[in-house]
């Protein structure tokens, strides 16, 4: 398992490198909140995210950066430009999600999805737009919350068949609700940075 901490600026990227991580994740929620004081509801633009990606790539040096690309920032023609801009910034991978625009942070409720067919057009545009076969495309489905785990798995399987390099099922488990505080743990806990996406 690779732990890729969420980064959102040059300082956080330098910290990820200095602490010996083998990858980092440019978090859309982190960029929105720390960079612009905004919630992660589709307010940060593609050009703003690409500029943050470029800064993080420079700070990380040889540590690969996975970058949140939200819904691709528009129709398939916009996705083509998104892929090319992120590729030019030097990212190792981009993550695209099957939410409708404007999207919401994966941990928020009331997410609206596009159809799987619509997302396959987005995914196809991204895969075709790559000029660097080394840049990976991560297909993320947010179907777990609004449509259930079975639909999320169906979508993930379709995205895999279409050529996605990596699959991401957002919120694979429903959070447990408790009225009492969780017990303290002496174990150190790690999570993937994509939880901040």
Image (cartoon, grey):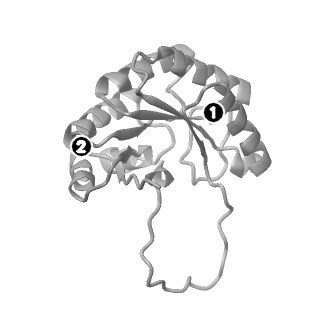
In space, the residues marked 1 and 2 are separated at their CA atoms by: 31 Å
Q: Nearer the viewer, residue 11 or 36?
A: 11
Q: Residue at x 63, y 34 (%)?
A: 98
Front position in the image: 148 or 178: 148
Is residue 20 rendered to the left or right of residue 37? left
Of pointers 1 and 2, the one earlier in the residue sequence:
2
The answer to whether 134 is drawn above or below residue 44 in the figure is: above
Q: Horizontally, is 1 left or right of 18 in the view? A: right
Query: Element type at marker 1?
Result: loop
Residue at 21% across / 36% down in the picture?
58
Residue 7 pos. (x, y %)? 33, 49
Does residue 149 show up? yes
Other residues around mark 1 within 10 Å, as few (<14) / some (14–19) / many (≥20): some
In this view, the mark in front (1 or 2):
2
Instruction: Please identify the quarter of the rendering in which residue 158 is found.
Output: top right
Residue drawn at x 57%, y 49% as measured from the top left: 106
Question: Residue at 71% across / 36% down in the picture?
Answer: 157
| Residue 148 appears anywhere in the view | no
189 in relation to 24, above or below: below
Percent coordinates x, y for residue 35 in the rendering: 31, 45
Judged from the image, the secondary structure of the residue bearing numbered disc 2 is: helix
Q: Position of residue 131 (x, y in %)?
A: 41, 15
Residue 59 is situated, as x and y percent measured from the top left of the image, at 20, 42
**Residue 4 drawn above or below residue 112:** below
The reply, left or right, for residue 112 in relation to residue 190 is: right
Q: Quadrant of residue 143?
A: top right
Tell me, for residue 100, which label it has, or none.
1
Q: Which residue is mark 2?
A: 60
Q: Nearer the viewer, residue 30 or 57?
A: 57
């Amino acid at each position: 398992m690779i732990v890729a901490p969420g980064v959102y600026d040059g300082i956080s990227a330098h910290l990820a490198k200095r602490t010996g991580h083998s990858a980092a994740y440019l978090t859309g929620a982190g960029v929105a909140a720390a960079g612009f004081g905004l919630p992660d509801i589709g307010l940060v633009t593609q050009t703003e995210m690409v500029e943050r990606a470029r800064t993080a790539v420079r700070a990380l040096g040889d540590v690969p950066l996975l970058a949140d690309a939200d819904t691709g920032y528009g129709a398939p023609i916009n996705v083509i430009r998104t892929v090319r801009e992120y590729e030019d910034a030097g990212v190792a991978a981009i993550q695209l999600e099957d939410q409708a625009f404007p999207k919401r942070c994966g941990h928020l409720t009331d997410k609206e999805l596009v159809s799987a067919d619509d997302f396959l057009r987005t995914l196809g545009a991204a895969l075709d737009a790559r000029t660097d076969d080394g840049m990976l495309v991560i297909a993320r489905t947010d179907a777990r919350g609004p449509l259930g785990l079975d639909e999320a798995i169906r979508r993930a399987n379709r995205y895999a068949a279409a050529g996605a390099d990596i699959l991401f099922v957002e919120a694979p488990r429903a959070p447990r609700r408790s009225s009492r505080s969780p017990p303290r743990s002496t174990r150190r806990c790690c999570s993937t940075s994509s939880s901040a996406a």
